[in-house]
Amino acid sequence: MFGELSDKLDGFFRKLKGRGKLTEQDVKEALRDVRRILLEADVHFTVAKEFLDRVQERAVGAEVIKSVTPAQQVVKIIHDELAELLGGTFRPLKRSHEPPTVIMMVGLQGSGKTTSSGKLAKLLMRQGSRPMLAACDLQRPAAVDQLERVGEQAGVPVFTNREVTPVQAATEAREAARRKSFDTLIVDTAGRLHIDDALMNELKEMAAAIKPAEIIFVADAMTGQDAVNSAKAFSEALGVTGVILTKLDGDARGGAALSIRSVSGAPIRYAGVGEKLEDFEEFHPTRMADRILGMGDVVSLVEKAQQTVDMDMAAKLAKKLKKQQFDLEDFLDQLHQISKMGPLDGLLKMIPGAGKALKGIEVDESEMRHTEAIILSMTPDERRKPQLINGSRRKRIAAGSGTSVQDVNRLLNQFEQMRKLFKRMGGNMPKGGIPEGMPFPPA
């Protein structure tokens, strides 16, 4: 989402690096460029002004003017202020003294409340909670059915009662969660295509009845300033305590994400970064500032790996690598581990410097699918002993996988090069094999 903003800020920083020292006038002129960049990225104009005022106040001080490397100082100041603009630090969800902790999901129709409810439930379950979902959107046709499907995919129970009012359904859901010892209740509420009194009155009545610990506004990041204005209206009416941004993996300009916290007063808590239920992450402002400025986000990358990588499988692989017994079945397992972590281009952006190095290069994820198809077209013996694959077998594998013999040859050559690399490394493999259980990318 922040690609265009990152590119423009990178160009701005490159211009600064060419100067030995900065005068106060230099800083003011440079910040005019940043103002233009922020407004073009659809940042709310008042947010952009306040942000630049804070940056200028720090940047015209002695720490920058007298610095040997003023560009680095300005980068740091902008980084710190960006992190503050996005919320400063990640704030975990508040917990009620007596379970269940009620989380009320609100927002306009189509913003992604139902899917986000399931994603949040799945994330909380991974963190050790026992969540339950409540279907309280009784306005939209099939909304209850949709939440039931999401709950089934997430492995989370869903409370439903289509015969009562939404407020009664929410109240009954809270009592059911208490009886069945669920520690968290996530309430999916109705939305509208626009803000109206009927919607707000229903939500206010529901909040008064179930007393949620958190009221989370779900915003579609692709809608730009509309999401910001909606967040402000919901916050003023309901006292929103946090925001979930959906479609943060999209190609919008990113201004909504930078504006929404300042305008609504509510911190961004989580972000949807893909269509799968697993594509959901905590929103850490400092890490997001790192990504925007092209510094990568190794901490989030390792956390993602720890959540998705099978550590027992990683330990077995490490032993096989040390004994130089790595085969195509192990290679296939690694492809599956990587695919669980999310889109490759998103993972690469978390590696410091990778975004700039790969700028303009399209990451073709279909290559991974082709590789998987080729390996799956082999017999178990061929995967364990690639040297068995002669010319006729290569033709059969190519036909079975819908690829060409050249594709099969390329994969086998890459795999052989990888095996030779591991052989040269021999006993120099790090203890535990791959650091932190991280899968390695295909050759």
Image (spheres, helix red, strand yellow):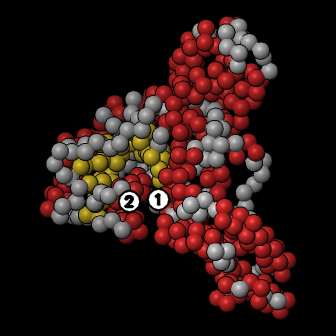
Q: How many residues crowd around disc 1 within 10 Å: few (fewer than 14), some, or many (20 or more)?
A: some
Q: Nearer the viewer, residue 324 or 56?
A: 324
Marks 1 and 2, Cα distance to the nearest angstrom?
Answer: 8 Å
Q: Is residue 236 visible?
A: yes
Q: Is residue 233 left or right of residue 185?
A: right
Residue at the disc numbered 1: 307
Question: 85 left or right of 440?
Answer: left
Along the viewing direction, whichever of 17 and 87 lies nearer the viewer: 17
Which numbered disc, 1 or 2, marks the residue that appears first in the sequence?
Answer: 2
Instruction: Give above or below for 418 relative to 259.
Output: below
Question: Circle 2 is placed at which residue position?
Answer: 126
Task: Quadrant for residue 420, please give it.
Answer: bottom right
Residue drawn 63% across the image and 71% down it: 321
Q: Residue furthest front?
A: 427
Residue 303, position as x, y percentages in the image: 49, 52
Residue 63 drawn at (x, y percent): 60, 12
Residue 382: give x, y in percent of width and height.
70, 87
Q: Which residue is at a point 53% across and 16% down the rendered structure image?
A: 54
Q: Quadrant of residue 3?
A: top right
Using the rendered view, name the quadrant where residue 199 is placed.
Answer: top left
Confirm or deny contact between disc 1 and disc 2 (CB under 8 A).
yes
Callout 1 amino acid: Gln
Residue at image point 66% right, 61% down? 428
